[in-house]
Every structure is written in structure tokens, then in C-alpha cells.
Image: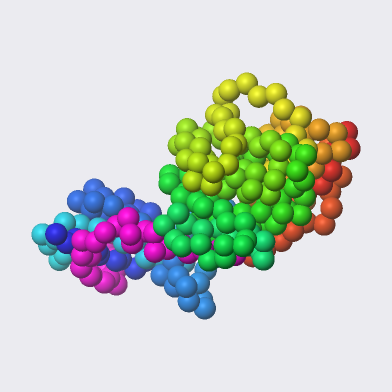
Amino acid sequence: MAWINISIFSNNEYADQISDTLLEIGALSTSIQDKNLNQNNEEMIFGEPHDGPQQFWQHSQIDALFNESVDTSSILLALEKKFELSFDYAVHEVKDEDWVKKSQEQFNPIQINDQLWIIPSWHEVVNKEAINLILDPGLAFGTGSHPTTHLCLQWLIDNTLPTFTVLDYGCGSGILAIAAKKLNAKNVLGVDIDNQAVQASQDNAKKNSVIINVMHVSEPLEIQADLVVANILSSALSVLAPVLAGYCKMNGRIALSGILEHQEDQIKKIYQQWFSFETSLKKDGWVCIHGTKIK
């Protein structure tokens, strides 16, 4: 079995409407990306769900997947008729493959430093002498490839002590919680709003032969942690400030990420009533702010 992928090239004004129209006329799925993805003129767009209307690239590529029996000319004609425009396009066949294997090929071992590696569960361990975090992201956020994950892992490496209790708020795949435990933290708790993330964290803990507690955010939580780490959206960090501050013990430490550089001062301003901040960690336009609880 095979499918037909039709790529339509448009500006940002029509990208979303074209995607909707393709679904209406029989596309099995659609996606929108920068036409210049991975090229020198790639356009970077950063944002969050609350930032307002969805932004699209000036030069957008709308990909639509159809059954192999599709009449490509009728699809293009329908678009031209609706928008009263002609669009550049490309068509190619998508052969049936082992999609699980294809997806796994996107993830390779990641070295955080000499001490810590992230190893996808289907890969061989690269350095058996290092701390190897075996990870299967499943349906949860947290593959280890994002800059904010790197920043938080580095912070945990520098701050985790064997006597510490660590809270990972918004644990996703469990990557930070499991790393803290492998760095010899005494007690580790992961919390998430997504049941699938809770399950993924529990499964990944088993893969790593570590014991961490994982719970849904709706469950009652009483904790005074030595370290609190939250790698989530800045909008959530803003709302959760008094909650996260309350979970951190006096003179305990906090690390907050999922923050773009232009959002750093805003988040610091909210949290500075409880914390004294140090120089932020930065990578590829992202920030991890960290400090000590003083009030």
C-alpha cells in the first residue's frame, strides 16, 4: 500500500485555510512547515498557545496525505477555484514502511556531559562507565533533545546531593526525575497534568531500575523539596509561582525553564518575592533561571 503526498506552497496568509480545505476535500492528514526548513534562510517562529493567533511562515509548505487513488488534478483545481489563485506544488509517493522504526531513527544517544548520557531504549549504550538514562518518550514530552532539557539536566548535575528530595513538576517522560534519582537524590517525586505522562514516567523509571514517585497533579501533594525543577511553558510558570514556591523549602533551590530569552525578566519578576536568582543558563534562545529560596 502507498499514499500520495501533495505539497502546496503558499504565503502565510493562506496556509491555514489551505490546510483546512485539503482536509475538507479528502486529505487523510495535513501539516504546515517552513518551506525553507533546515536551510540558511529558515524562518524561526517562537510562541506559546496564549500568544494570540497562530503564526505561519512567510513561505509555507502545506503537506497533505491522500489515498493512492487520489486525482491530483482535481485537488489542485478545487484549491484554485476556492482561492482564485494558482499555487506551486509538488507530488510524491509515500511508500508503506515500518513507521515505528522510522520514528525511532529520529532519536539517537545524546551526551549531556562526560557524566550523563540519554539513550533511547532501542539503542545500545555508548559509554557503560557513564550515567546512562534509558528513555522511551512514548506519548509524553521529553526526549532529551530540546535545549531546555539540556539546561535542566546540567543544573541537576551541578546541584543534586544524596540527601536531597527533588520535585520535578511537569515531569513529562520522567527524564528529569529519573536523572535526579540516578544522580543519587534520596527521594524524587514527579508530577504531571497528563495521565499519559504519568504512565510514561513510571515506565521509564522501570527501564532505568530506579524508584521514583509519580502522581497526577489532581492528587494532594505535601512536600518541602530541596530542589524543585519545572520545565514547562512560561505561561504555566507564571500561574504556578506561589504553588512551586510553596513546595520548595527555605534555602532550597529552584530551576525554571521552558522560557524564551525575552520572557526571562518577566518570570524572574514574578518569582523574586520568594527567590534570589543567579546568572541564568542559556542555550539556543532558551533560558533556565535558577536561584535560592529566601522567603
The furthest residue to the bottom? 40
User: Is residue 284 or residue 16 the one in the foreground?
Assistant: 284
Q: Position of residue 35 (x, y in %)?
A: 41, 70
Instruction: Give the magenta range.
Output: 82-111
- The colour scheme of the drawn protein is rainbow
Q: Position of residue 180 (x, y in %)?
A: 66, 46
User: Is residue 290 or residue 29 the one in the foreground?
Assistant: 290
Q: Quadrant of residue 132?
A: bottom right
Residue at 57% from the left image edge and 33% from the top image edge: 214
- 203 shown above or below 14: above
Q: Position of residue 255 (x, y in %)?
A: 73, 46
Residue 45 visible, this angle:
no
The furthest residue to the front? 129
Residue at 50% from the left image edge and 72% from the top image edge: 42
Image quadrant containing the C terminus: top right
Query: Total of numbered circles in the picture?
Result: 0
Q: Position of residue 48 (x, y in %)?
A: 56, 48
Side (left or right) of 234 relative to 279: left
Residue at 23% from the left image edge and 65% from the top image edge: 94
Side (left or right) of 153 relative to 253: left
The furthest residue to the top? 220
Q: Quadrant of residue 62?
A: bottom left
Residue 279 visible, this angle:
yes
- 76 shown above or below 207: below
User: Is residue 24 or residue 272 the one in the foreground?
Assistant: 272
Magenta-span inclusion, residue 61: no
Residue at 86% from the left image edge and 38% from the top image edge: 251
Image quadrant containing the N terminus: bottom left
